[in-house]
Amino acid sequence: MTFPPPLRFLIPALLLILGLLSACLDYELDLRNDLERDFNDVTTQASATGTRLSAMARQHLDLGDIKGLNDNLSDWKHEPWLHLAALVDEKGTVLASSSSQWVGHSAEESPASDAWKHSRKKTGAFMESGTVDGANFMVQAAFPVEDKSRKPYWLLLVYDRANAVLHAHEDARKRMAWSASVIALMCLSLWATLHFGVARRLERLARSVREFGEGRAISIGAVNGGDEVHELSQAFGKMTQRLTDRERERIELERAVIESAENERRRIGHELHDSIGQQLTAVLMAINGLQEELQAKTPALAERAQQTSQSLRETLAEVRGLSHGLAPVPLWEQGLELALQALADTTARSSGIRCVFECPEHLPEVNEATSCNLYRIAQEAVSNALKHADSQEIRIGLECRDGSLALEVDDDGCGLPEGPADRGGLGFRIMQHRTEVMGGRMEYGAPPAGGTRIAVQIPINS
């Protein structure tokens, strides 16, 4: 995954972190409030209990009834949270207690030791001490008691808040766990919405647009849904449909232009061959007849007639060459295979370079427009090999391959230039254009033996 991560991961993760921090803070605040509320409840109860027990202890001291005081204090040990109630003298000896085991012992040895120490400093003030995990969390208080002789005593109270504190912690943890679970579920839902509801759909749309841009798709399908992503996909679909329609119109128009140009070339070629060629042939025959007459009467003029006849033969050969180039007879009369064979033979004769045509099997019938385009592509490729490749052999191949018609022109020359800008000549662009008009694709590169290969592949039904 890249950094920073995509928004569909980043936003839920940040919200989850913030939510968990908020849950932890809420846990601390709730726990503090619960503990403070519980402490206030205990101190209120301790204050009321201490006042009542102090009055009762004073009465028993005035009567000298310590045993009765012990019995009364034992009855108070069932009060909620009360752990120990003890009356101690000024030396700290426990005189009476709700737990008889501490009677006669020093207060410092009992659970009320902190209260005893605190009472020496500030009588009547409450204090809190202990730990939560160890279940030793106490609230202790000391109340002064005087008998009728004004002898000082202290009533010490110890309240055990361990269970209450532990319950408060447990409740706070449960609330935090529920809050964290709800936040995590909400963040997961948000991620699922962003991932499956937005990101994945945008990814499909981007892939469709990319495939359309690379020519591997002819349209962009609409993404399901009723939100902005669906509207965006519809807008892209309409745009691609307009582009496809314009591209189709352009190809049809260019095809019509090429066909019109080919028809005009064919007409001019036929005119050169049938009209001008025939006229030149007639003039040549007349000059040959005139030459024979002049040879008998005026030999000097006969030699000039022979020179004129030779020039006329050369002109007639050029006219025939032009007519065959504009309208190759094998292409129109005998088909693409024989036309390419004739192109190879003519190239070998005229250039002195070995040029062969290979067609391993008889091809299905190809329409006239496709045959003309393939012939012109082969003609341009051969011409480029002769002009630029400095080759010694040229191969023209034609075959059916995977339901398509494949044309290849190879040479053993110096290969294509490295700079892509040098491959953008007019002839090269015309070959690409003819291939696109036929609905095919053209590739170029080097064959295994080196040199240059121009490969064109078009659907047979084009």
Image: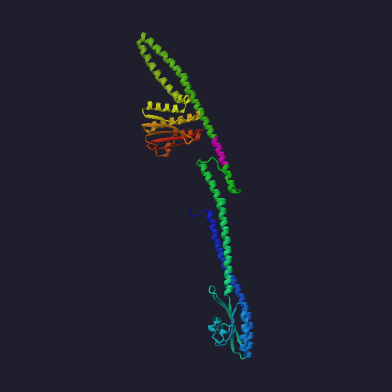
- On the question of residue 462 being in view, the answer is no
Q: Position of residue 150 (x, y in %)?
A: 61, 90
Name the side, left or right, on which 4 lies relative to 35: left
Please tell me which residue lies in front, 86 or 319. 86
Farthest residue toward the top?
Answer: 297
Q: Position of residue 233 (x, y in %)?
A: 57, 45
- On the question of residue 180 being in view, the answer is yes
Name the side, left or right, on which 395 lies relative to 218: left
In this view, 305 is above or below 183: above
Q: Position of residue 456 (x, y in %)?
A: 46, 35
Prevailing SS of the magenta stretch:
helix
Give residue 130's quadrant in the image: bottom right
Residue at the spot x=53%, y=30% of the render?
A: 256
Give residue 173's quadrant in the image: bottom right
Farthest residue toward the front?
Answer: 361
Name the side, left or right, on which 163 lies relative to 335: right
Give residue 302's quadrant in the image: top left
Residue at the spot x=49%, y=23% of the render?
A: 267
Find the magenta span and give its range: 238-248
Please say which color scheme the image uses.
rainbow
Residue at the spot x=41%, y=35% of the render?
A: 453
State yes or no: residue 454 in magenta.
no
Q: Position of residue 107 (x, y in %)?
A: 55, 84
In this view, 140 is above or below 248: below
In this view, 161 is above or below 447: below
Q: Say how many tags the image has.
A: 0
Farthest residue toward the bottom?
Answer: 149
Residue at the spot x=61%, y=75% of the render?
A: 40
